[in-house]
């Protein structure tokens, strides 16, 4: 450590002990990573990182991701010392407490300077890959000779756990294939996980694995050797055709006499006595806690000033770019702000009753290709299912090594795709989408959930949405998946009934993109008739609407049939059959529970009047949850068992998703209503 100056060591120890003191005061947290990884973080933030604490959303900043989110105290210490206004010393003292900006794991919506929400290991790793994809795509879209307005790096600190997780491996594989050279990851190689030594379960040569993925790999044998760390990062930055992994051998809980290099340093406070001993071992004053020496503050101020100079230089270059390319500059700024150009939806297809029946997945594909020319920031792809999910943008080229087309090929990597698309959404300036079969949303559910938690504006296209897909059988037939996705807060699930509602769903999804609300669409494989549906745009945007009124009008409704997706057609047929019995039904299409919940009580009453308690829901999936809309006196027609392998129409009928079963259910309810004798049941 001879090459490290006293000031360097004082700065690193300030980072260490701000973190340790925060954990100790909270009596909760992870002190081990900050103690071991502070040197690499210090070098990165003071020597390389482009940022502006006064403008955390500056488009050309470097992105820093703490993928090992359990080490959040280190990130908060960095943000405080570099001058982010959200991160006062009082916030650090309030670590992990109610209402603070310093939660146990970093949350991007809560704290300025936190790029992505991390904690579940491997997610931040994948997010960074998505950011590198977005950086390359926007550079290709907006940069012009002499004007590199998109020109920066994506850095991360990742842990053993990030490299163990399958999502990290999936993302690493595709990053290497794509040659994402703006990606530089620092691997905190401390040989310890919660259960003990990584030798218990993690013994492959990680460097060789990443070399096999196509990454450039650097190794630093001493995590306290600042010169070696700086040299390795500089070397990684020069590898513009390969992502880089810098493996840095560290010691978890560095300096702790009794907990260094043990699992005990990972996820619990050191303890009052061990904090004292650790400070003494590293030559740090035991008191006061949360100490920031004046010359440390001044040094980080210099790093902040250096970063702001880079921001000022970029602003001057952007002004020159805007003068030479005013339309591109305006488009870039609008895209970063998630604004949509005038007429963005003008070319969405119009479907008419009498048109040939069409699967909603195919209607969605037509919508994507109608939107793409007007929204050049739209980019996405599928987990090796594009021909089935209909998510290719025609003539837009592929995103591959050496090119930046708009069609991403994620391979059979649903979970990695989820984390990557979330990262693209968090990066900004792009409208990202990812696609697979609805059944395989299970493979990416953690990514969907954490994307919703941080409101990463992504669009998920899930096709083959019910047992109606047929012959592939129960392994591919979703049952509980619609309800499972509805259970995720801040995720809008839209299940359109026909091609017209599908176009409305895309219009709504783009409006929700402006609000940073992620959207999942559930689309059919089977063809569906096009409905006479003039209210679809407003109806889908409001989540539910009256699609077909009872023949006697809204004042004389006997039963309300509520349906989603392909089952709307079942409800309409049931309505006709009930009318033959002089029973008058209203059919409500409810493509999006979440949007309907947002509506006021007056609209709820308009669609689902409280006085009509005889209600039947129809959806080819789990019935759990439908009591919310049908009430205690209603019934849910659905599927609470696994599906079967047979033609889709046969499976639907055998499992009770039929007009006849809906009529039978409605009649059973009506038979128990007062005055039931009036009907010929």
Image (cartoon, grey):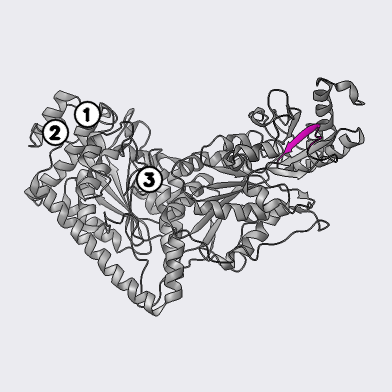
Q: In the image, which residues are magenta?
A: 555-565
Q: CA distance from mark 1 to mark 2?
A: 9 Å
Task: Quickly name the residue at label 2.
Answer: 289
Helix, strand or loop at disc 3? loop
Question: Residue placed at 35% from the left, 30% from the top?
Answer: 200
The image quadrant that residue 369 belongs to is bottom right
- Tag 1, which secondary structure? helix
**What residue would you read off at disc 1?**
25
The residue sitting at the bottom extreme is 324
Q: Secondary structure at mark 2?
A: loop
Count of numbered marks: 3
> How far apart, in angstroms, are the residues tagged by discs 3 and 1?
23 Å
Which residue is the site of mark 3? 108
Tags 2 and 3 in contact by the CB under 8 Å rule? no
Q: Is residue 562 on the magenta stretch?
A: yes
| Nearest to N terminus: mark 3 or mark 1 | 1
Q: Nearer the viewer, residue 466 or 77?
A: 77
Residue 159 sits above or below residue 156 on the image: above
Report which quarter residue 198 is drawn in. Answer: top left
Quarter holding the C terminus?
A: top right
Q: Are marks 3 and 1 in contact (CB under 8 Å)?
A: no
Residue at the spot 67% in from the left edge and 32% down from the top edge:
629
Q: Horizontal placement of 429 versus 668: left or right?
A: left
């Amino acid at each position: 450590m001879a090459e490290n100056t006293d000031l360097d060591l004082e700065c690193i120890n300030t980072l260490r002990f701000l973190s340790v003191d925060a954990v100790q005061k909270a009596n909760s947290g992870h002190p081990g990573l900050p103690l071991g990884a502070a040197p690499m973080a210090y070098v990165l933030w003071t020597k390389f990182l482009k940022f502006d604490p006064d403008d955390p959303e500056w488009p050309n900043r470097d992105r820093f991701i703490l993928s090992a989110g359990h080490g959040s105290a280190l990130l908060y210490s960095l943000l405080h010392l570099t001058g982010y206004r959200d991160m006062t010393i009082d916030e650090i003292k309030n670590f992990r407490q109610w209402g603070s900006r310093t939660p146990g794991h970093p949350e991007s919506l809560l704290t300025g300077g936190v790029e992505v929400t991390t904690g579940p290991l491997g997610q931040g790793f994948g997010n960074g890959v998505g950011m590198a994809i977005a950086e390359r795509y926007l550079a290709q879209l907006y940069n012009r000779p002499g004007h590199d307005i998109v020109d920066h790096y994506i850095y991360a600190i990742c842990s053993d756990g990030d490299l163990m997780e399958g999502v990290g491996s999936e993302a690493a594989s595709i990053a290497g294939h794509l040659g994402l050279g703006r990606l530089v990851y620092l691997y905190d190689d401390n040989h310890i996980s919660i259960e003990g030594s990584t030798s218990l379960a993690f013994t492959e040569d990680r460097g060789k694995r990443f070399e096999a993925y196509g990454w450039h790999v650097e190794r630093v044998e001493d995590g306290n050797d600042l010169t070696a760390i700086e040299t390795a990062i500089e070397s990684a930055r020069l590898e513009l055709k390969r992502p880089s992994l810098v493996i840095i051998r560290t010691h978890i809980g560095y300096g702790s006499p009794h907990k260094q290099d043990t699992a005990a340093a990972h996820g619990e406070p050191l303890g009052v006595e061990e904090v004292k001993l650790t400070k003494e071992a590293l030559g740090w004053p035991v008191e006061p806690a949360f100490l920031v020496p004046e010359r440390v503050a001044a040094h980080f101020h210099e790093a902040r000033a250096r970063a702001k100079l880079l921001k000022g230089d970029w602003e001057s270059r952007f002004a020159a770019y805007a003068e030479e390319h005013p339309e591109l500059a305006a488009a870039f700024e609008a895209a970063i702000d998630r604004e949509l150009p005038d007429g963005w939806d003008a070319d969405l297809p119009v479907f008419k009753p009498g048109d040939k029946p069409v699967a909603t997945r195919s209607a969605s594909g037509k919508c994507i290709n109608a939107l793409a020319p007007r929204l050049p920031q739209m980019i996405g792809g599928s987990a090796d299912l594009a021909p089935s999910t209909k998510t290719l943008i025609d003539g837009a080229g592929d995103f591959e090594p050496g090119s930046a087309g708009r069609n991403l090929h994620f391979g059979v990597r649903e979970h990695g795709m989820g984390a990557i698309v979330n990262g693209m959404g968090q990066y900004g300036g792009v409208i990202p989408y990812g696609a697979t079969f609805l059944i395989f949303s299970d493979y990416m559910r953690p990514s969907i959930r954490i994307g919703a938690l941080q409101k990463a504006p992504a669009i998920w296209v899930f096709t083959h949405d019910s047992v109606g897909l047929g012959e592939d059988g129960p392994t591919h037939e979703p049952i509980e998946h619609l309800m499972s996705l509805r259970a995720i807060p801040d995720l809008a699930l839209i299940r359109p009934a026909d091609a017209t509602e599908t176009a409305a769903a895309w219009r709504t999804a783009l409006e929700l993109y402006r609000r940073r609300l992620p959207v999942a669409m559930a689309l059919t494989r089977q063809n569906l008739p096009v409905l006479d549906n003039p209210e679809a745009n407003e109806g889908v945007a409001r989540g539910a609407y009256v699609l077909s009124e009872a023949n006697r009008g809204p004042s004389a409704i006997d039963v309300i049939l509520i349906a989603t997706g392909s089952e709307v057609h079942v409800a309409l047929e049931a309505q006709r059959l009930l009318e033959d019995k002089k029973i008058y039904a209203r059919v409500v299409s409810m493509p999006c529970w979440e949007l309907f919940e947002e509506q006021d009580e007056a609209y709820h009453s308009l669609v689902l009047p409280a006085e009509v308690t005889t209600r039947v829901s129809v959806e080819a999936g789990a019935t759990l949850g439908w009591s919310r809309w049908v009430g205690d006196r209603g019934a849910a027609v659905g599927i609470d068992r696994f599906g079967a392998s047979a033609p889709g129409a046969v499976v639907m009928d055998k499992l009770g998703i039929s007009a006849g079963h809906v009529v039978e259910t409605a009649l059973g309810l009506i038979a128990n209503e007062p005055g039931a004798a009036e009907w010929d049941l």
